[in-house]
């Protein structure tokens, strides 16, 4: 077998990598804000009797219950029929953000509900409003608890962002996977390019995993849980 | 003179009526000890006083402000009533100092420096100034409960409610918490204490309230109530308690 790799692929792949990172970072950041709000609404809006609760729950179930691929293609190819035409980049970003927000809402809800009920009660007993209690007591603890599932979601979205290449990303706005396919279409080196692209993703995932581990350790509450390195 | 008035408070959870019309008054500087079997509504009563639990009916006044009125700013009332929980409920992500300081900064809007000084003074008062930087998980149960008392004290409460403050503690840690509470009572703090510590009740309480089945069965000064209870149910409860904890109580 004769594998051929070419340094000339690197600039194109690096461009793709940057776009992949941009998409992932933006959708995860926006998704965290949106997801946290949805999670808060689902916990604190007063449950089954509140329209807000139903709105948030409906949103979460809808976007978790349908494939991201279908969401993306609907936004990119479907919305223009009703006069909303988004560029490949924006269609990708919107689809990924809407989708991850639904998943993150569930992670935030779980984290908020894992904070012991006594914490809210103690905060309220001091005279804090509910909003103050959420801000000073509940969220700081929930944010720590959400880091592990959020890390998984980040890695998942990083890899799944490759579906944006199924819309017509032009040469200037190609993600990592799209860049690989572009090179393949010109060099016909399918196997080699897939290997390189896979290695790029793998490296990104490993780096992000390490960074998030470090963050998790940094914000760990002293005395709680088991330290990462035992003596 | 009267600081707190509780008038005919009822509370039901589903089918079960947990409080069946409880009334009591508390004078400034008074320490009332509430005793009674578990599941009797003691915690529910304490939580109704600052509406952590919403009573179904009945009225409550703190001095001349009606706590139960819809027009009352309940957060303003709560800031004046300390609450000490059985399982401490310290904010787990904050140091002892920040636990005591949070209410001062967020509720009382004290400037940071002033809040810090006040919080340190309260930690000093419970003997834990040297633990200011420690997180709750790094403290013993007794220390955690003392921090939670400091957290309540920092708000300058008119009254502190203690819900079985030593029940979650190992026996050897109970003394340090009771010592703090005894000193508070001596300094004139107004308190309602739910406890099974009969020794504490005997020596500190101005009045003992015996609750059972959602009603106050009997109340009176400790000497009288312990020596010659009027109701058979009170006598029966006291007998069971002394079997559990010994004649003198703890
Ligand atoms: N939030 C709640 N929801 C449902 N039932 C409750 C709740 N809190 C207390 N109860 C019930 O009310 C009764 C009295 O409880 P509680 O006030 O905690 O008693 P005590 O403090 O005297 O042990 C118990 O039967 C308990 O199960
Ligand atoms: Mg109780």
Image (cartoon, coloured by chain):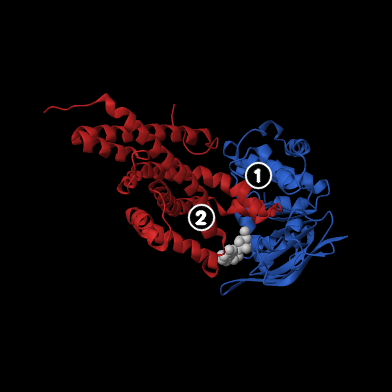
Count of marks, rendered view: 2
Chain shown red: that is A
Residue at mark 2: chain = A
Residue located at (34% from left, 56% from top): A77
Residue at mark 1: C-beta within 8 A of ligand 2: no
Q: Which of the two marks, 2 or 1, is nearer to us in this view?
A: 2
Left/right of residue A146 with respect to residue B98 in the rendered view = left
Outermost residue toward the bottom? B15
**Residue at the disc numbered 1:** B145
Dot 1: element = helix
Outermost residue toward the left? A1
Residue B37 visible in rendering: no
Camera-side residue: A69 or B41? A69
| Whole-percent x, y for residue B137 in the image | 57, 39
Residue at mark 1: chain = B
Left/right of residue A193 with respect to residue A53 in the rendered view = left
Camera-side residue: A66 or A138? A66
Q: Colour of chain B?
A: blue
- Quadrant containing the N terminus of chain B is bottom right
User: In the image, is residue B65 above or below residue B168?
Assistant: below
Q: Which mark is residue A39?
A: 2
- The quadrant of the rendered image in which ligand 1 is seen is bottom right
Left/right of residue B159 with respect to residue B47 in the rendered view = right
Residue located at (22% from left, 26% from top): A5
């Amino acid at each position: 077998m004769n594998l051929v790799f070419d340094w000339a692929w690197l600039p194109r792949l690096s461009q793709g990598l940057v776009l992949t990172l941009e998409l992932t970072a933006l959708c995860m950041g926006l998704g965290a804000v949106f997801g946290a709000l949805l999670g808060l609404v689902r916990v604190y809006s007063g449950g089954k009797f509140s329209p807000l609760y139903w709105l948030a729950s409906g949103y979460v179930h809808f976007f978790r219950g349908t494939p991201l691929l279908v969401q993306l293609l609907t936004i990119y190819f479907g919305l223009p029929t009703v006069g909303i035409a988004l560029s490949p980049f924006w269609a990708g970003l919107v689809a990924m953000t809407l989708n991850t927000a639904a998943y993150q809402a569930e992670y935030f809800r779980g984290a908020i509900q894992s904070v012991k009920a006594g914490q809210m009660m103690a905060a309220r007993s001091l005279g804090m409003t509910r909003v103050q209690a959420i801000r000073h007591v509940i969220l700081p603890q929930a944010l720590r608890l959400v880091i592990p599932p959020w890390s998984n979601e980040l890695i998942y979205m990083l890899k799944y962002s490759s579906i944006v290449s199924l819309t017509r990303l032009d040469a200037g706005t190609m993600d990592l996977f799209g860049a690989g396919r572009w090179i393949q279409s010109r060099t016909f080196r399918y196997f080699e390019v897939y290997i390189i692209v896979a290695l790029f993703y793998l490296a990104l995932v490993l780096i992000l995993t390490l960074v998030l581990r470090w963050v998790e350790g940094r914000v760990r509450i002293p005395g709680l849980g088991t330290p990462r390195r035992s003596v | 003179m009267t600081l707190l008035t509780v008038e005919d408070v009822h509370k039901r959870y589903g089918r079960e009526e947990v409080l069946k019309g409880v009334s009591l008054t508390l004078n400034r500087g008074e320490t009332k000890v509430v005793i009674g079997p578990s599941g009797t509504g003691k915690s529910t009563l304490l939580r109704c006083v600052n509406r952590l639990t919403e009573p179904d009916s009945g009225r409550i006044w703190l001095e001349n402000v009606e706590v139960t009125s819809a027009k009352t700013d309940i957060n303003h009332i709560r800031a004046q009533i300390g609450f000490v929980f059985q399982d401490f409920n310290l904010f787990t992500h904050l140091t002892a100092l920040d636990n005591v300081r949070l209410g001062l900064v967020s509720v009382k809007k004290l400037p940071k420096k002033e809040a810090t000084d006040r919080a340190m003074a309260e930690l000093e008062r419970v003997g834990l100034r040297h633990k200011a930087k420690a997180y709750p998980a790094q403290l013993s149960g007794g220390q955690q409960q003392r921090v939670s008392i400091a957290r309540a004290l920092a708000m300058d409460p008119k009254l502190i409610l203690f819900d079985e403050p030593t029940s979650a503690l190992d026996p050897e840690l109970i003394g340090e918490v009771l010592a703090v509470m005894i000193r508070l009572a001596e300094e004139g703090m107004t308190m309602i204490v739910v406890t099974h510590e009969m020794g504490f009740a005997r020596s500190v309480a101005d009045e003992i309230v015996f609750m059972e089945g959602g009603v106050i069965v009997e109340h009176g000064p400790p000497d009288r109530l312990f020596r010659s209870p009027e109701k058979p149910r009170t006598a029966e409860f006291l007998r069971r308690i002394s079997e559990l904890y010994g004649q003198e109580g703890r």
